[in-house]
Amino acid sequence: MAGCAASIALARKGRRVTLIEREPTPRHKVCGEFLSGEALEDLHALGIDVASLGAVPIDCVRLAAARRAAEAPLPFPAASLTRKALDTALIAEAIAAGVRVERGRSVQALGRTASGMWKATLNDGATFEAPTVFLATGKQDLRGYTRPEDPQRWVAFKMYFRLGSAQAAELARASELMLYPGGYGGIQPVEGGIANLCCVVQQRYLAHVGHRWESFLAKMQQDCPHLAMRLAGAEPLLAKPIAITHIPYGYIRPTTENGLYCIGDQAAVIPSFTGDGISIALHTARCAVAAYVAAEPAPVFQAKLRSALLTQMRLAEFAADGLNNSLARAVLPFCLRVWPGVMRVTAKLTRVAHRAAVAPMQSPAAI
Ligand SMILES: Cc1cc2nc3c(=O)[nH]c(=O)nc-3n(C[C@H](O)[C@H](O)[C@H](O)COP(=O)(O)OP(=O)(O)OC[C@H]3O[C@@H](n4cnc5c(N)ncnc54)[C@H](O)[C@@H]3O)c2cc1C
C-alpha cells in the first residue's frame, strides 16, 4: 500500500523508481479492509476509483459485546474493498505511472556501499543501488531495521464467509465491531456479496483453545452471540484463515538514517479497530515523497511524522485497552445505546490527524 503509493507519486514527479515486491501476484492479506474517508481521498488522488472496483459503501458502525449491540452512523464516508482488488489496482497504477516493478523478488538485506549509496540485495543474489530508499515492507521487518517485540503477542486472522441471505441483508452497509475476552474482531461486507471476518486475539487467550482456529471461532461466538447470529448458516470461503503474528501496535519509528524514508506499518502501527492503517500507509507515503522532493533529510521527516502521529496513536491505544477491559466490555454497548454520540466521538478521536503538519521544511522552490 505505502510502497505503491510512494512509487506512483515519485514517478509522477519524474523520478526513476524501482518497486520491489516479494509476492508475484496480489494475494489475500490479513486486514479488515475498511477504507476510511482519508484513505478514500488519498486513493482518489492516486487515480484509484474504488467504486468501479466494486467497493461497498459503509455508513454505519455497530458495536457488539456479550448480548448487547449498539449502532451509530459513521461521521465520515467509508467503504470496504478486498486488499487483493486494491493491491491489484495500485500495482497497475504504478506500472502505468512508469514505475519499474520487480515482482516475486524479495529484499534480503539493505546496506550502504562505500560510496554512500543504498544497496538492496535480493533473494536471487541480484543487487540494486539507489541514493534513496522508501522502506515499506509492512508487517515484515528487514534484518537490521526491526521494530520492537509485540509484548501482547497478538495473533490476527482473516476469513471470508458467504452469509445467509437474512444475515447479509442485516449486515448491509455496516462495519460491526465485536468484543470478546483477549481481543476484538470486525465483520463487514466486501465486494462480490461476501463478508470479511477479521479478528485479533492475544496469544495467551488463543492458548486456552489449543491455538486452533475452529475452537477460537467457536469461543468467539460463545462469548459474542451477535457473531454467532451473523455466522449461522454461513459458508467459509477459504480453506483456512489467513493469519499473522507480531503486530507491534502503538509503535512509531523514532528515527531513521539519511536517505531512508520509512512509511506505512514501518513508520507506525495503529490498533486495528480504528480501521486507519491503510490511511496511515497512504498518508505517510505522500508525506515522505513531499519531504524527499523538498530535499528534507529523512531523519527530520521521520521525527516530524512521529510527533504528528503521537497523540492519535496514544488515544487509539488507550481506546484499545478499554476494549480489552472486561468491565468496559460489559458496559460499553449499553452506554452507546444511551448515547450513540460516544461512538462518533471515539471514531473521530482515533482517526489520525492526517492533515497534521508534516509539510517539508524547505519551500517548494527548493525542489
Ligand atoms: C488484523 C488487522 C486488521 C486491519 N484492518 C484494517 C482495516 O480494516 N482498515 C485499515 O485501514 N487498516 C487495517 N489494518 C492495517 C493495514 O492492513 C496496514 O496498516 C497496511 O496494510 C499497511 O500498509 P503497508 O504498505 O505498510 O504494508 P502492506 O500493505 O502489508 O505491504 C507491504 C508489502 O511489502 C512486501 N514485502 C514485505 N517484505 C518484503 C521484502 N523483504 N521484499 C520485498 N517485498 C516485501 C509484502 O509482500 C507487501 O506486499 C489492519 C491490520 C491488521 C493486523
Image: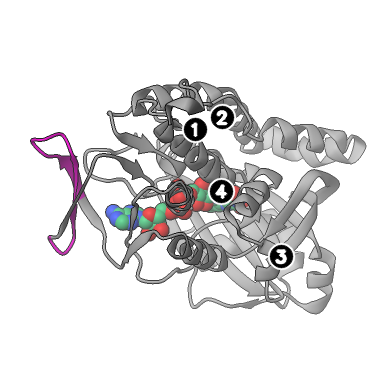
Disc 2 to disc 3, C-alpha distance: 29 Å
Q: Secondary structure at mark 2?
A: helix
Circle nearer the N terminus (4, 3): 3
Q: Does mark 4's beta carbon lie closer than 8 Å to ligand 1?
A: yes
Disc 2 to disc 1, C-alpha distance: 6 Å
Instruction: Farthest residue to the front: give it.
Output: 365
- Numbered disc in front, either 1 or 3: 3
Circle nearer the N terminus (2, 4): 4
Point out the stretch of residues depicted in magenta. Answer: 109-125
Circle nearer the N terminus (2, 1): 1
* Pointer 4 residue: 278
Amino acid type for the residue under numbered disc 3: Ala
Circle nearer the N terminus (2, 3): 3
The answer to whether marks 2 and 1 mark residues whose Cβ atoms lie closer than 8 Å is: yes
* Pointer 1 residue: 250
Q: Secondary structure at mark 1?
A: loop
* Pointer 2 residue: 313
- Numbered disc in front, either 1 or 4: 4
| Relative depth, front residue between 264 and 187 | 264
